[in-house]
Amino acid sequence: LQLSPIHVIFQVNYVTKAPKPEIPKNPLESVYSAPQQKDNGIIYDKKPFKISLEAGKTYHWCLCGRSKSQPLCDGTHKDVFLKISQKPVRFTVEKTRDYWLCNCKQTKLRPFCDGTHKQKEIMEAHIKV
């Protein structure tokens, strides 16, 4: 009985950075206020907010930056004495899971964080809240 040698090859992959997470789309974007509002709100925080969201449920993301229930709207924008022009962005998600919502209020992908908070002018800004 003659045995043949067994050759084993291992492939090792090294990753220096975690892959960038996919930024979800807001299915309600064209229907409710996100693209129609030209101005961004005041910077509430310089980092995003991780939140668990349910598929199909409608949420209202605070754009003005003054809600006490960040990152979601609490109706503060309705106070006539504050003269706030921004309205909340209505949105939903397609999958139930954790999402990163923008808290600097400067994202181009409302309401989801797109990394805008890392820009120099955001990092150096004074938070007024």
Image (cartoon, rainbow, N blue to C red):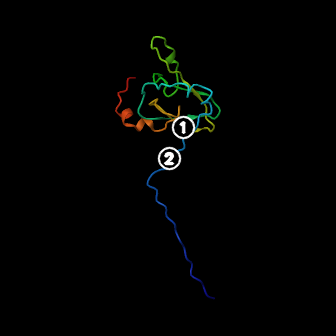
61 lies left or right of 28: left
**In the current view of this chain or complex, which residue is farthest to the top?**
81
Q: Quadrant of the C terminus?
A: top left
Q: What residue is pinned by disc 1?
A: 99
**Residue drawn at point x = 63 percent, y = 37 percent:** 94
Quarter occupied by residue 42: top left
> Looking at the image, which is closer to me, 23 or 85?
85
Q: Position of residue 13 (x, y in %)?
A: 49, 61
Secondary structure beneath dot 2 equals loop
Q: Which mark is residue 42?
A: none
CA gap between label 1 and label 2 equals: 13 Å
Which is more N-terminal, label 2 or label 1? 2
Secondary structure beneath dot 1 equals strand
**Residue drawn at point x = 38 percent, y = 23 percent:** 128
Q: Is residue 73 above or below residue 11?
A: above
Label 2 Cα crowd, 10 Å radius (few <14 / some 14-19 / many 20+) = few
The type of residue carrying mark 2 is Lys
Q: Is residue 38 above or below residue 23?
A: above
Q: Is residue 2 above or below residue 40?
A: below
Q: Position of residue 105 (x, y in %)?
A: 46, 29
Q: Position of residue 80 (x, y in %)?
A: 48, 11
Q: How many marks?
A: 2
**In the current view of this chain or complex, which residue is farthest to the bottom?**
1
Q: What residue is pinned by disc 2?
A: 20
- Foreground disc of the pair 1, 2: 2
**In the current view of this chain or complex, which residue is farthest to the right?**
56
Q: Quadrant of the N terminus?
A: bottom right
The type of residue carrying mark 1 is Tyr
- The answer to whether marks 1 and 2 mark residues whose Cβ atoms lie closer than 8 Å is no
Q: Position of residue 28 (x, y in %)?
A: 62, 30
